[in-house]
Image (cartoon, rainbow, N blue to C red):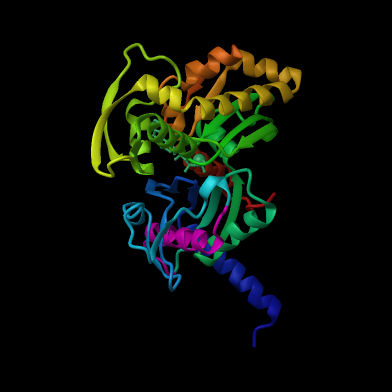
């Protein structure tokens, strides 16, 4: 019979062995999208954070891309859930099912692969939720799992010198949350977040179109409008597109033109909230670090960093130069991968 201690030591050694054989995973568990980076292979998965659930049985029917296609098109007994709506874990069981599904999808030898996993999560989630996400990753086959704050991961991924004694500011505008952080010497010095980001803009567009143009459109159409002709600052050439929805009066399908000026007007409020958050964070930042940020500029990450003119708007409102990260949609997952590299050969918790 193996003693308890011997058994623990054997499993630890086996874990190390398998840990070395399997590839580390970096995961961006976002409100809108989940990305998985596999060491040595790159970003192997990029899917919407959506789960389709049968509401009568609670059974998970599909996850990711397949589930997103069902949003707004599901029969009544099937619900398409965004388990991390608004940047917090709204539904823990579906978050776990989704994480499990995505980890399974990238592991080729499920049985003996037990990778180390670093997961970027919204900084607004509670300590209990953090532990729960780590536990979920372990149950999904991770040898060890660690969560890190999304803005820290975004800053690392955007190539900011996070370990140096200079202040770097990152603004991550994702689907559900906007997070602003000033980082220096490997830690977050000032941080603010708000549950206003891309999805709130989609809702604002749908509300505007309903109130001003009497047309009913769904979330997916509103998001398309934002991506196609949305902007935060006047465009050199304003644009127009035809949008399709349901006429509120007749109830029939109808197409009408919408201009980029109208879309800007529609998202004025959420844009204002984001600008205010950046200003407040700058205000709260100690003077030396704030001076660094003013000299070195602010870096934008997250999908909404791609909204045209967001850099110009923030710069005009704060008088600080603003840059968009090279690939804002992958900054967090790349950051988790770099973080894992730094941990190579070290235990996950220091
Ligand atoms: N070209 C674009 N222009 C404007 N918005 C865009 C563009 N591309 C993507 N987005 C928006 O970016 C958001 C998703 O960004 P991202 O993938 O960074 O979010 P997330 O990490 O899942 O969310 P969070 O960080 O809040 O948890 C969506 O609202 C999407 O509509
Ligand atoms: Mg994100």
| Residue visible at 48% across and 34% down in the picture | 302
Asked if residue 86 lies in the magenta stretch, the reply is no
In magenta, the rendered stretch is 89-111
Residue 60, given in percent of the width and then of the height, sits at 41, 66
Q: Nearer the viewer, residue 2 or 42?
A: 42
Residue found at x 66% / y 34%: 192
Tell me if residue 144 comes above or below residue 85 in the rendering: below
Task: Indicate whether residue 107 is drawn in magenta.
Answer: yes
Q: Nearer the viewer, residue 123 or 231?
A: 231
Residue at 57% across / 21% down in the picture? 298
Image x and y of residue 117, in percent: 53, 54
Q: Quadrant of the N terminus?
A: bottom right
Give the x, y percent position of residue 162: 62, 30
- The picture quadrant where one finds residue 306 is top left
Q: What percent of the width, then of the height, locates residue 211?
A: 41, 33
Q: Is residue 259 above or below residue 145?
A: above
267 with respect to 320 (left or right): left
Main secondary-structure element of the magenta-colored stretch:
helix
The image quarter in which residue 223 lies: top left
Q: Residue furthest bottom?
A: 1
- Please tell me in which quadrant of the rendered image residue 263 appears: top left
Whether residue 84 can be seen here: yes
Q: Is residue 16 visible?
A: no
């Amino acid at each position: 019979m193996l003693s308890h201690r011997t058994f623990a030591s054997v499993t630890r050694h086996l874990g190390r062995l398998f840990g070395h054989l399997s590839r580390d995973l970096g995961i961006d568990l976002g409100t809108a999208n989940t990305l998985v980076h596999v060491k040595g292979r790159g970003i192997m998965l990029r899917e919407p954070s959506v789960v389709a659930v049968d509401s009568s049985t609670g059974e998970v029917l599909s996850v990711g891309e397949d589930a997103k296609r069902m949003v707004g098109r599901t029969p009544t007994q099937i619900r398409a859930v965004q388990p991390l709506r608004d940047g917090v874990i709204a539904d823990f069981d579906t978050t776990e099912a989704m994480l499990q599904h995505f980890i399974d999808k990238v592991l080729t030898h499920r049985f003996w692969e037990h990778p180390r996993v670093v997961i970027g999560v919204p900084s607004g989630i509670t300590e209990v939720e953090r532990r729960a996400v780590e536990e979920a990753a372990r149950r999904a086959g991770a040898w060890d799992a660690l969560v890190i704050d999304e803005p820290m991961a975004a800053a690392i991924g955007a190539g900011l010198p996070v370990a140096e004694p200079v202040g770097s500011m990152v603004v991550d505008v994702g689907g559900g949350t906007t997070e602003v952080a000033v980082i220096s010497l490997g830690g977050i010095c000032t941080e603010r977040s708000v549950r206003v980001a891309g999805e709130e803009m989609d809702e604002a567009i749908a509300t505007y179109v309903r109130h001003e143009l009497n047309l009913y459109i769904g979330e997916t159409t509103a998001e398309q409008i934002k991506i196609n002709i949305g902007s935060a600052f006047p465009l050199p050439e304003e644009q127009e597109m035809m949008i399709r929805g349901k006429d509120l009066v007749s109830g029939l399908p109808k197409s009408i033109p919408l201009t980029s000026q109208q879309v800007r007007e529609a998202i004025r409020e959420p844009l204002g909230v984001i600008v205010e958050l950046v200003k407040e964070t700058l205000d709260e930042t100690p003077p030396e670090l704030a001076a660094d940020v003013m000299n070195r500029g602010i870096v934008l990450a997250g999908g909404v960093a791609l909204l045209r003119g967001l850099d110009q708007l923030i710069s005009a409102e704060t008088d600080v130069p603003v840059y968009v990260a090279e690939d804002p949609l992958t900054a967090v997952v790349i950051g988790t991968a770099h973080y894992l590299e730094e941990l190579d050969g070290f235990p996950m918790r220091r």
